[in-house]
Image: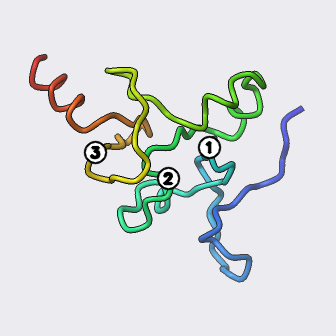
Amino acid sequence: MKSTRKHYCACNPRSKTNREEAKWYCFRHRRHLCDDCIYDELNQRHISCMVGSYQSFIKSAPSQISSFKHNKCPICDKILPDDDARAVVRLNCACVYHTTCLQQYLLSN
């Protein structure tokens, strides 16, 4: 049964008239996020977090939840830092990589 409840990012207060539904869900912090917050360079709270849809989080196995605490770079399989915005890059697809790993990968291919 699919939920019809809408979820909103914290930056979208109820008093706002044109609220947009949150597109992303942070698996680490368990928060609904909008595009503005997930790609925000000033507020780097979700800079290296694993994100996806809320439905994908609900469908994931309970044993996988601990792996959401620390997202890993798909190229080198090492944990991504959550305190250095220059060390990671998030693509438009919401995937996160070490900046150096992605640069080396793109230059070699």
**Could you say where residue 46 lies in the image, as x and y percent from the top left?**
50, 52
Which residue appears farthest toward the top when viewing the image? 109
Q: Does 28 sit left or right of 60 as displayed?
A: left
Q: What is the CA distance from the residue labelled 1 to the residue labelled 3?
A: 19 Å
- Is tag 2's residue or tag 1's residue first in the polypeptide sequence? 1
* Amino acid found under the numbered disc labelled 2: His
Report helix, strand or loop for mark 1.
loop
* Amino acid found under the numbered disc labelled 1: Arg
Residue located beneath label 3 in the image: 87
- Residue mark closest to the camera, 3 vs 2: 3
Q: Which residue is at a point 62% across and 43% down the rendered structure image?
A: 28
- Is tag 1's residue or tag 3's residue first in the polypeptide sequence? 1
Between 33 and 71, the residue placed more toward the observer is 71
58 relative to 17, above or below: above
Residue located beneath label 2 in the image: 46
46 relative to 99, above or below: below
Residue located beneath label 1 in the image: 28
Q: Quadrant of the C terminus?
A: top left
Q: Does 19 sit left or right of 42 as displayed?
A: right
Q: Which residue is at a point 69% across and 41% down the rendered structure image?
A: 54
Q: Residues within 10 Å of mark 3 (few under 14, many from 20)?
A: some
Q: Quadrant of the N terminus?
A: top right
Disc 2 vs disc 1: Cβ atoms closer than 8 Å?
yes
Give the mark count. Answer: 3
Q: Residues within 10 Å of mark 2 (few under 14, many from 20)?
A: many
Q: Which residue is at a point 39% across and 21% down the rendered structure image?
A: 77
68 relative to 82, above or below: above
* Amino acid found under the numbered disc labelled 3: Ala
